[in-house]
Image (cartoon, grey):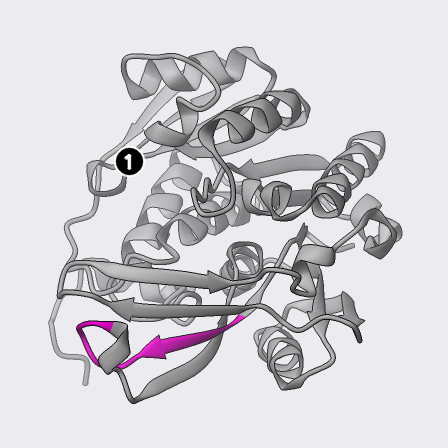
């Protein structure tokens, strides 16, 4: 049995090493990135097992994804190689010391061609949790169909369904996103969203009101991510608040994935509600203290570094 199965698009990631306009960058780091695969890596690092389902091109970037994910302990038996489309690209740069700019080149990419036939149904039905995101819903009609098919398989097998809204304005309008999210949210057991993302689906004046309104649609657990303000959780009618961790932010990309991974890993481990929310916030906070979409995802021993007894480890 796999603890968590997720599906979506992962891409090759070029990161400019110089702060400023991308046109002036001459030196780049090469890696991989993708919300769903980030969560898979994060869950594995926290002690659970995870598998990723997706399509990559028959190219070096596709091989980079395979080797990176498998090297991090993620099961890649659900990875499909598309000989007719390239692996998507993501380019990340720091426009200023405080502003990170992320650009995607995914039109007609292998990942956007994900379809229901690509799903490893046996893998999904044997999992404890299926995790999906709104990104995959927005990629293409076939990718959206794959998400709905995966959710249907999970629900039929009694598998917990988790979803992170992960709204990307470059992929679709708020109107399209609202319609699609209102359709799928009632089929979800665990929902992650920022306040702005929650308002794509429901109305509410504050995080608690938004979480309650989303919970009324069906999810048993709703997590409102508030960044530097902490988080709010409504689970089975009970409201929990989490205070933020004071950290120095180096790279905000991937914080939400770390938060989701922390909460899901603790849920899989059978932790109590207070611990799972605390771990989620700690993982999200730790992720922003180092650079990289997934490289900065914490292991359990790393979480102790948020409150070090000594700034120097010897």
Residue 14 lies in magenta, yes or no? yes
Question: Quick one: quadrant of the N terminus?
Answer: bottom right
Tag count: 1
- Whether residue 97 is situated above or below residue 225 in the rendered picture: below
Q: Is residue 25 rendered to the left or right of residue 258?
A: left
**Residue 271 screen position, x and y as percent:** 50, 40
Q: Residue at x 57, y 74 (%)?
A: 72
Q: Residue at x 63, y 28 (%)?
A: 188
Q: Is residue 28 rendered to the left or right of residue 90?
A: left
99 and 280: which is toward the camera: 99
**Residue 285 screen position, x and y as percent:** 28, 53
Residue 297 lies in magenta, yes or no? no
State the image quarter where residue 22 is shown. Answer: bottom left
**Residue 193 screen position, x and y as percent:** 43, 33
Q: Is residue 190 rendered to the left or right of residue 244?
A: right
**Residue 24 screen position, x and y as percent:** 23, 81
Q: Does the image show residue 40?
A: yes
Question: Quick one: quadrant of the C terminus?
Answer: bottom left
Q: Does the image show residue 126?
A: no
- Whether residue 24 is situated above or below residue 221 in the rendered picture: below
State the image quarter where residue 132 is shown. Answer: top right
Q: Is residue 136 rendered to the left or right of residue 302?
A: right
Mark 1, Cα crowd under 10 Å, few <14 / some 14-19 / many 20+, is some
192 and 246: which is toward the camera: 192
Q: Which residue is mark 1?
A: 226
Q: Residue at x 70, y 65 (%)?
A: 110
- Whether residue 149 is situated above or below residue 69 in the rendered picture: above
**Magenta-highlighted residues:** 12-21
């Amino acid at each position: 049995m796999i603890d968590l199965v997720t599906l979506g698009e992962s891409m090759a990631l070029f990161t400019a090493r110089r702060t400023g306009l991308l046109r002036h960058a001459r030196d780049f780091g090469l890696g991989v990135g993708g919300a769903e695969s980030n969560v898979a890596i994060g869950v594995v690092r926290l002690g659970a097992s995870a598998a990723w389902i997706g399509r990559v091109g028959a190219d070096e970037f596709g091989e980079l994804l395979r080797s990176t994910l498998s090297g991090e302990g993620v099961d890649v038996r659900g990875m499909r190689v598309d000989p007719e489309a390239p692996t998507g690209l993501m380019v990340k740069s720091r426009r200023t010391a405080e502003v990170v700019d992320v650009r995607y080149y995914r039109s007609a990419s292998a990942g956007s061609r994900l379809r229901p036939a690509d799903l490893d149904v046996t893998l999904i039905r044997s999992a404890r949790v299926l995790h999906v995101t709104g990104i995959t819903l927005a990629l293409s009609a076939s990718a959206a169909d794959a998400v709905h098919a995966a959710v249907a398989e999970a629900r039929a097998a009694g598998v917990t369904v988790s979803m992170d809204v992960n709204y990307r304005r470059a992929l679709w309008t708020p109107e399209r996103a609202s319609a699609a999210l209102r359709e799928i949210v009632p089929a979800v057991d665990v929902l992650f969203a920022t306040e702005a993302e929650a308002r794509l689906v429901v109305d509410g004046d504050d995080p608690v009101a938004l979480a309650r309104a989303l919970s009324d649609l069906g999810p048993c657990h709703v997590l409102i991510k508030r960044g530097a303000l902490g988080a709010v959780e409504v689970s089975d009618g009970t409201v929990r608040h989490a205070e933020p961790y004071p950290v120095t932010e180096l790279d905000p990309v991937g914080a939400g994935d770390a938060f989701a991974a922390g909460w899901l890993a603790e849920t899989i481990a059978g932790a109590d509600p207070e611990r799972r929310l605390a771990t989620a916030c700690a993982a999200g906070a730790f992720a922003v203290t180092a650079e990289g979409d997934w490289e900065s995802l914490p292991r359990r021993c790393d979480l102790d570094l948020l409150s070090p007894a000594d700034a120097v480890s010897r």
